[in-house]
Amino acid sequence: MKKHIVTCVKCGRQFDANEGGAYYPESRRYVCKHCVDKQKDIQKEQAKARKAAEREAEADERERVTGMRQSKTAMLVKIVVGVLFLFAAVSLAVQGNISSFVCGLVIGGALVAWGLVPYLKTKSGRR
C-alpha cells in the first residue's frame, strides 16, 4: 500500500497514516498512534480516579446515614467467617491441638470483633 505521510496535530511528528493513529474527518487532521495511546492512558487514569472518588463518596454517605463506613454485606461476611473460624477452633480443641485452637480462636474473635464493633458503636451512640 502506498505511504500516506501526514503530520500529527498534537506533537508534530510525521507518520504514515496507514500504519495507525486517528483521523479527524471534520478538520482533515491526523493524530499519531503515540498521542492516541497517551490520551487513552490519561482517560484510564481519570476514570480510575473518578471511581475511587465515587467509592469514597459512597462510604462517606453510608457513614453519615448509618454511622459505619463498612457496608452491611462486608460486616456480615466478616462475622460469618469469624464464626466459621471459631467453629474450626473448637473442633481443633476437641482433637487436642491446643496451639491451632488458640490461633483459630484469636483469628475468629478478631474477625467477629472487626465486623461487630463499628455496628455496636453506632447503636450505642458513640463515635
Image (spheres, rainbow, N blue to C red):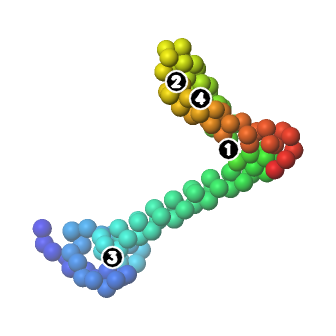
Q: Position of residue 45 (x, y in %)?
A: 48, 64
Q: Amino acid at mark 1?
A: Gln
Question: Can you tell which of label 2 and label 1 is closer to the viewer?
Answer: 2
Rendered residue at 15%/74% (across/down): 3
Q: Position of residue 73 (x, y in %)?
A: 65, 35
Mark 1 lies on residue: 70
Mark 2 lies on residue: 98
Q: Amino acid at mark 2?
A: Ile
Residues under numbered marks 3 and 2 in contact, where contact means CB atoms less than 8 Å apart: no
Closest to the observer: 38 or 78? 78
Mark 3 lies on residue: 30
Q: Amino acid at mark 4?
A: Leu
Q: CA distance from mark 2 to mark 4?
A: 10 Å
Rendered residue at 79%/38% (across/down): 120
Q: Position of residue 113 (x, y in %)?
A: 68, 36
Q: CA distance from mark 4 to mark 1?
A: 24 Å
Closest to the observer: 109 or 84? 109
Q: CA distance from mark 3 to mark 4?
A: 65 Å
| Residue at the left extreme, as displayed | 1
